[in-house]
Amino acid sequence: MLDVETLARKWEKAHPRVILQEASGLGLKWTLAMSFSREDTVILHWLSQIRQPVDAFWLDTNLLFPETYEFKDEVAARYPVNLRHIQPSLSLADQAERYGESLWKQDPHQCCYVRKVEPLFAALAGYDGWITGIRREQSPTRAHAKVIEWDAQHELYKLNPLALWSTEDVQSFAEANGVPVNPLHGQGYPSFGCYPCTRPVKPGESIRAGRWEGWDKSECGIHQ
Ligand code: SF4
């Protein structure tokens, strides 16, 4: 077992690339969660310089923005990545039959459980740890994210190498290093997921203000 508290303290001020480099040398099997945000692509950029092919996965809810589906192909063509396509056990038609049409309008918690939370367990099976792009700045629910932590829900390590970076840090790195960026970021979406549950943010709003508007919900449930 890793001493995650000691490692978290050690990596608190380290550059994310150094964190990824050192984590890759621990003899563990890591996989990168890709939602195709700027954060994920920047991490993929670094990982591709450390070990190829990069092991990654994406949770296809079947309800992502068209821009994201197109961008996924661009990323897969650009980087040496084994991008595992993870889908829910229920198609949208099966889900409608079981729970009713447009479940996201009636019960987004259940919809996220079926289309994201449950599939994540399958995506992480057989791995020692997963790597995410979450940052403390993104929301109060992420404000205490450690650079590395034990994910008790999935019983594996969780590496958040960008935990301390700001939006500007990520943006500047992507621009300076030619990292491709999902066009949604340029259309008012600092954060995005499924199109029925995401709207662009207005000036002055928080990063995740456009997610699940009208619901007491700010996370899909994969980050506890
Ligand atoms: S974000 Fe919305 S559409 Fe996507 S899984 Fe969650 S509730 Fe369903």
Image (cartoon, rainbow, N blue to C red):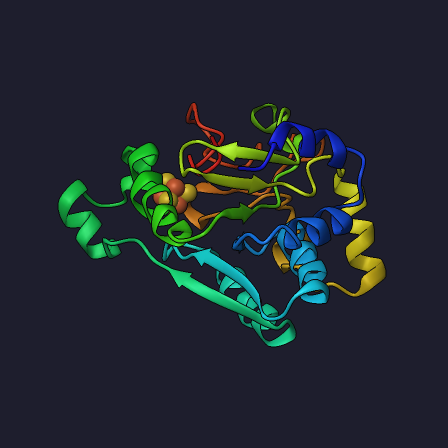
Horizontal relation, residue 178 to residue 115: left or right: right
Number of labels in the image equals: 0
Q: Is residue 175 above or below residue 135?
A: below
Residue at the left extreme of this rendering: 97
Residue in the picture at 53% in, 37% down: 1
Horizontal relation, residue 20 to residue 92: left or right: right
Residue at the bottom extreme of this rendering: 77
Q: Is residue 191 above or below residue 207?
A: below
Residue in the picture at 14% in, 49% down: 97
Q: Is residue 44 above or below residue 224?
A: below
Q: Quadrant of ligand 1?
A: top left
Which residue is more in the foreground, 11 or 167?
Answer: 11
Q: Is residue 173 above or below residue 104?
A: below
From the top left corner, tell me how far across and down residue 93 is, in percent: 20, 56
Whether residue 206 can be seen here: yes
Whether residue 137 can be seen here: no
From the top left corner, tell me how far across and down residue 83 is, in percent: 49, 66
From the top left corner, tell me how far across and down residue 143 is, in percent: 64, 25
Which residue is more in the foreground, 16 or 59?
Answer: 16
Quadrant position of residue 180: bottom right
Residue in the picture at 43% in, 23% down: 216
Horizontal relation, residue 59 to residue 74: left or right: left
From the top left corner, tell me how far across and down residue 163 is, in percent: 68, 36
Residue in the picture at 63% in, 50% down: 26
Which residue is more in the foreground, 139 or 44?
Answer: 44
